Image (cartoon, rainbow, N blue to C red):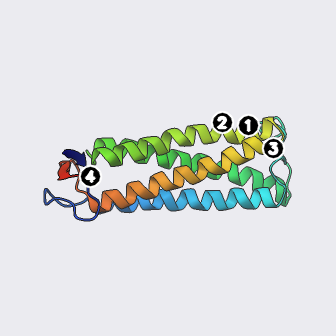
Amino acid sequence: LLTNIVLLEDPPDVGTPDHRFARTALYAAGATLALMLLGSYVSGRNAGLAFPDWPLFNGRFVPDGAGLLPMLHFGHRVAAAVVGAGVVWLAVQARKTSQHSIVVRLTTLGAAGFGAQVLLGAGNVWTELSVATRTAHLATGAVIWSLLFAAAYTARRLPPNAATVEIPVT
């Protein structure tokens, strides 16, 4: 019985991996991890409700008040916008550069997950930090990081458009 399985340990000799794309994907994964750490700090400092509205900041596009907690909350939202744009850009680049299909899927799922993550972040504000939305927000962030790290690893190991390798499954 043969099945199509993509090998990560020993890729077939059908070209060279795109190390530049892999490095970019690793940066996106690292930025996502940094965003998660910032979000954890915001949560730990009880700054998650520094602004009771979303997407605005007390009805404004940019908060007018100073102070650590409001600025942490604002910083997390701004960082999320920047990282999210980077993750979407990465998914687009994966398609444009004809990355291996698994890399395209991983980055596309990461970008879609980021969209869900934004809604969960808004849900944190709208539900006044309910346990369900906080948990889902954290879990989704971890999944996005995992997808991007897997994309970076896979892009480093497999050349773009690598053929799927058939191996016997026993």
Residue at 24% from the left image edge and 53% from the top image edge: 170
- Badge number at residue 129: 3
Left or right of residue 127: residue 4: left
Residue at 46% from the left image edge and 61% from the top image edge: 27
- Badge number at residue 123: 1
Going from N to C along the chain, the mark reached first, 3 or 4, is 4
Left or right of residue 78: residue 46: right
Q: As rendered, which of 41 and 86 lies closer to the eye? A: 41
Left or right of residue 126: residue 93: left
| Circle 2 SS class | helix
- Badge number at residue 6: 4
Left or right of residue 97: residue 59: right
Amino acid at circle 3: Leu
Give the x, y percent position of residue 142: 58, 54
Q: Are marks 1 and 4 in contact (CB under 8 Å)?
A: no
Amino acid at circle 4: Val
Q: Are marks 3 and 2 in contact (CB under 8 Å)?
A: no
Residue 61 visible in image: no
Q: Nearer the viewer, mark 2 or mark 4?
A: 4
Residue at 18% from the left image edge and 45% from the top image edge: 1
Amino acid at circle 1: Gly
| Circle 1 SS class | helix
Q: Are marks 1 and 2 in contact (CB under 8 Å)?
A: yes
| Circle 3 SS class | loop
Going from N to C along the chain, the mark reached first, 1 or 3, is 1
Label 1 to label 4: alpha-carbon separation: 38 Å
Q: Nearer the viewer, mark 3 or mark 4?
A: 4
Q: Are marks 1 and 3 in contact (CB under 8 Å)?
A: no
**In this figure, which residue is indicated by the disc labeled 2?**
119
| Circle 4 SS class | loop
- Badge number at residue 145: none
Label 2 to label 4: alpha-carbon separation: 33 Å
